[in-house]
Amino acid sequence: MSGKKFSFEQQLQRLEEIVAALEKGDAPLADSLTLFAEGTKLISACSKELDQAEQQVVKLMKGSDGAPVELPFAEKEE
């Protein structure tokens, strides 16, 4: 899955395939380690994408008149 950019859904699907293959337990050790390494990269990429999506989401709060007001999420301080 390297080289071109895959969608979040494609990455998640591949991760599910990797988990299923590892849970099956019949792959040779070297192949299992390769799958594990690919899985950890996918987890990192998916997590990063989810964090970016979270930053774009707005939360709704009631204004002084009771109507919803959109406010951006506060950015994390690092």
Image (tube, rainbow, N blue to C red):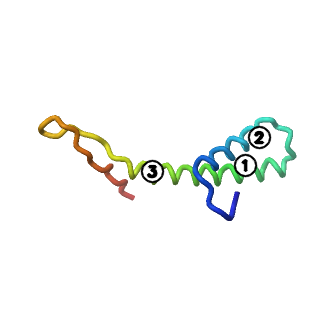
Q: Amino acid at mark 1?
A: Phe
Question: In the rendered view, would you say 25 is above or below 49?
Answer: above
Q: Residues within 10 Å of mark 2 (few under 14, many from 20)?
A: some
Residue 47, position as x, y percentages in the image: 54, 49
Dot 1 corresponds to which residue? Answer: 36
Q: Amino acid at mark 3?
A: Ala
**Residues under labels 3 and 1: Cα distance?**
26 Å
**Residue at the bottom extreme of this rendering:** 3
- Say left or right for 4 vs 59: right
Q: Quadrant of the C terminus?
A: bottom left
Marker disc for residue 22: 2
- Foreground of the two, 72 or 44: 72
Q: Residue at x 73, y 49 (%)?
A: 36
**Residues under labels 1 and 2: Cα distance?**
8 Å
- Say left or right for 55 vs 64: right
Q: Residue at x 77, y 40 (%)?
A: 22
Decide which of tag 3 and tag 2 comes sooner along the chain.
2
Dot 3 corresponds to which residue? Answer: 53
Decide which of tag 1 and tag 2 comes sooner along the chain.
2
Residue 55, position as x, y percentages in the image: 39, 52
Q: Given this view, does label 3 or label 1 mark the residue nearer the observer?
A: 3
Residue 37, position as x, y percentages in the image: 71, 53
Mark 1 touches mark 2? (CB < 8 Å): yes
**Residues under labels 3 and 2: Cα distance?**
29 Å
Marker disc for residue 25: none
**Residue at the left extreme of this rendering:** 65
Query: In what element is the residue under mark 1?
Result: helix
Q: Residues within 10 Å of mark 1 (few under 14, many from 20)?
A: some
Residue 35, position as x, y percentages in the image: 75, 49
